[in-house]
Amino acid sequence: RELTEFAMTGDHKAHWIPGDYDTEEYDYQHSRLSEIRGLFDKAFTENTSQKAFSKTGVQTPLMLKTDKGVYINLHEAALIDFPAINLDLDDKTMVFRVELTPDAQGNRGHIEAPFNTPWRTVIVSRDARDILASKLTYNLNEPCAYETTDWIKPIKYVGVWWEMITGMSTWAYTDDLPYVKIGKTDYSKAKPNGKHAANTQHVKEYIDFAAKHGFDAVLVEGWNIGWEDWFGHSKDRVFDFVTPYPDFDVAELHDYAKSKGVKLIMHHETSSSVWNYERHMEKAYKFMVDNGYSAVKSGYVGNIIPRGEYHYGQSMVNHYLHAVKEAAKHKISVNAHESVHMTGLSRTYPNLIAQESARGQEYQAFGGSKPNHLTVLPFTRLIGGPMDYTPGIFQMDISKYNPQNNSHVNTTICNQLACYVTMYSPLQMAADLPEVYEKHMDAFQFIKDVAVDWDDTKIIEAEPGEYITIARKAKNSDSWFVGNVAGYDGHKSTLSLDFLDAGKTYTATIYADAKGAHYKTNPEVYTIRKVKVKKGSKLSLQSAPGGGFAISIIPNSGK
């Protein structure tokens, strides 16, 4: 075991999710430390992965606030060849003990001396903004391991994803096969289900949309055979990552995307059959290079195969990094989903361009997330590195996509716009469907304009669980973008634009919740106005419950 402890000075307020060896995909709870045990039974008994090790265990990054207004963040940095941590609370003494994720035999890890353990990190300030601004987690990692990084590009993308998440379309090509065995199923004899999203013509429509509106890439999921029966199987009933469905023409789409100046993003769902993925990895990466793919979204849904291992155990920690290193040999960037929490490794391996590793946007289509979720993630999950949250949903009633899904997206359109600023990532998706954006082209303009790479960041105001307002200066530009996300109570902001350059004038385009906006009852109303601003100008804005605002501040030419 590891005997590290974090001794708290009182019954602090905590923003927490339950300790778990396999998933971080939870809504955050907000309570006193002494209340965790009671809330665990109430909130998580039916929803945990059943691997939760303790009814007082929590995951890191953990965000705390004392009664004296001191903010404390606990996490780890440089997680390499070691199991990930959770924290187990003794709620009598208020002491957290480090709990290492075990392997299939119950051992915490297998270590040879000499070795380095990951760092244990504590970020402390009386100002919540300092927690968000801290670079501690990154700086405890080694410098970049690569000689060149010019092949690693920030990406703003669209994709065939949300329509499948909502149930409007499918990953699978057919419904009439009881199971699939890679290399043995004759899809020419299968009847298409008519709902398969990753078909050549449909993907061309996304490519056209991306090219028209200046996006870098299109993500395509469900392009490869095996989706009819993929979950939790091993050996011959998993993906090979190179064989497309009959209605997906790899060469034609490569040529078409190239002609439009758009890249395609590969998707590798491993189904958590790790041995299978490693066996196919070199062939899969070479296939990507041969067909013009420079980035991959990988997934690890389901229990790890070989069975008994956990997503956050030492062997899987090593696998995730192995995939990133092997991808770098082919100049491929990696966006891993369902993988271990980030610990600043993007400093050393910058082709780890983003990860999910938290409750992302998809859960809004599975029943919704709390409307203050986005005011917590930057204080928790994003402490370790960029997140592929997939923002940009404009249609909040999921039944409009799929009449059998009555879920509701607990956010407003302006809250979604603000995510592109408040949720740092050099990989950002406009996740909704092109036909939805066509109805809101005025609001969609912010997504088109906003940068994904930055020269400067100012944390304007922040309180975990309540609100966050951030301003960022676009890379190699004098343009600034501001985003605010608010929780249950909304938020009133008075912004002083002191960060602008003196002697210049700017046009600020303000995207704000309209009067009466509300994440549940009226989420799709907004206002857009333009004002002239300069250094020191002040703006007063009101965010609705679960809402927010977004501002683009563009310098006026010649002034």
Image (cartoon, helix red, strand yellow):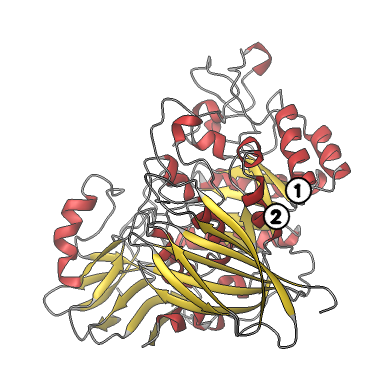
Q: Residue at x 62, y 39 (%)?
A: 439
Q: Quadrant of residue 251?
A: top right
| Amino acid type of the residue that numbered disc 2 sits on in the rendered structure | Lys
Residues packed near mark 1 inside 10 Å, few (<14), some (14 to 19) or many (20 plus): few
Q: Which mark is residue 213?
A: 1
Residue 168 left/right relative to 36 = right
Marks 2 and 1, Cα distance to the nearest angstrom?
A: 7 Å
- The answer to whether residue 252 is above or below residue 322 is above
Does residue 235 appear in the picture of this structure? no
Residues packed near mark 2 inside 10 Å, few (<14), some (14 to 19) or many (20 plus): some
Q: Quadrant of residue 221?
A: top right
Which residue lies under the disc numbered 2? Answer: 448
- Quadrant position of the C terminus in the picture: bottom right
Residue 100 left/right relative to 167 = left
- Residue 224's spot in the image, x, y percent? 65, 33
Q: Secondary structure at mark 1?
A: helix
- Residue 524's spot in the image, x, y percent? 49, 45
Does residue 91 appear in the picture of this structure? yes
Q: Which mark is residue 298?
A: none
Label pair 2/1, CB-CB below 8 angstroms: yes
- Residue 515's spot in the image, x, y percent? 44, 54
